[in-house]
Amino acid sequence: FYSRLGVSMKVLKFLKSYGFFIVVLIISIVFMLNFSTATVNGSSMFPNFENGDLLLVLRTKNVDYGDVVVVWNSTLGKKLCKRVIGKAGDSIEIIEGVLYRNDKVVQEPYIDSSLKYSFSKVTVPTGAIFVLGDNRCASTDSRALGSLPLSDLYGKSLFNFTKTLHITYREISFILAICWVFVIVNLFISKAKVIEPKMEIEQNEISEVKNETDISDESVEDSVAKNDNLEN
């Protein structure tokens, strides 16, 4: 029981000293595994997303119609930020600016409906998605690139830092760097607090040993004095 209690106390002391660092580390790992950031390049998603917008992206392959996604395109050799229009098995067609999915009109409040253009019907293959930019007249998307494989999908946008918080990539990088500096400094402070009590304990132990030595010396001296008295 006492040995278990001792282990528990050590664990509690460790958590008290390094708990904040451990929590930050766990949060960072969870974030990196499930989320990432992406920066919008160009005007293909204007006016909903502008050049330089910083997005929070959820790493997932499970996307739905209307989701804004970040996907890699090997033809262009870069990441694209586009909107999901069609999924596997869907037929996509555009007639005079009107989008048809599976022969049904799709309302698109996020685009300029005054643009009149057409696109011949295609069927989205298995394991792929059909994506378009909101700024249809200035977007290189599935109309030219074809359906994009889900295996090249990074994830979908959850939050626009720039439009909502007016924060750029450089600014959020600076904030994260400051946070990590704070964490590291706090770690060293916690470590110093752990070392100081150990030094005090060691000093106390040394003092106790000295006291015991002094006592034993006094006992020896008393014994010698008694023996001298007996001899006399």
Image (cartoon, grey):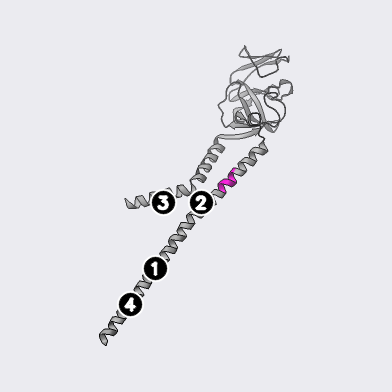
For the residue pair 128 and 106, the one nearer the viewer reads as 106
Q: Main secondary structure of the magenta part?
A: helix
Q: Tell me the amino acid under the disc marked 4.
A: Val
Does the residue at mark 3 contact the one at mark 2 (Cβ under 8 Å)?
no
Q: Amino acid at mark 1?
A: Val
- The alpha-carbon separation of the residues under discs 3 and 2 comes to 15 Å
The tag earlier along the polypeptide, 3 or 2, is 3
Residue beneath label 3, please?
10
Q: Residues within 10 Å of mark 4 (few under 14, many from 20)?
A: few
Q: Earlier in the sequence, mark 1 or mark 4?
A: 1
Numbered badge on residue 209: 1
Q: Earlier in the sequence, mark 3 or mark 4?
A: 3
Q: Nearer the viewer, residue 163 or 212?
A: 212
Q: Residues within 10 Å of mark 3 (few under 14, many from 20)?
A: few
Residue 37 placement: quadrant: top right
Q: Position of residue 148 (x, y in %)?
A: 64, 26
Disc assigned to residue 190: 2
- Residue bearing mark 4: 220
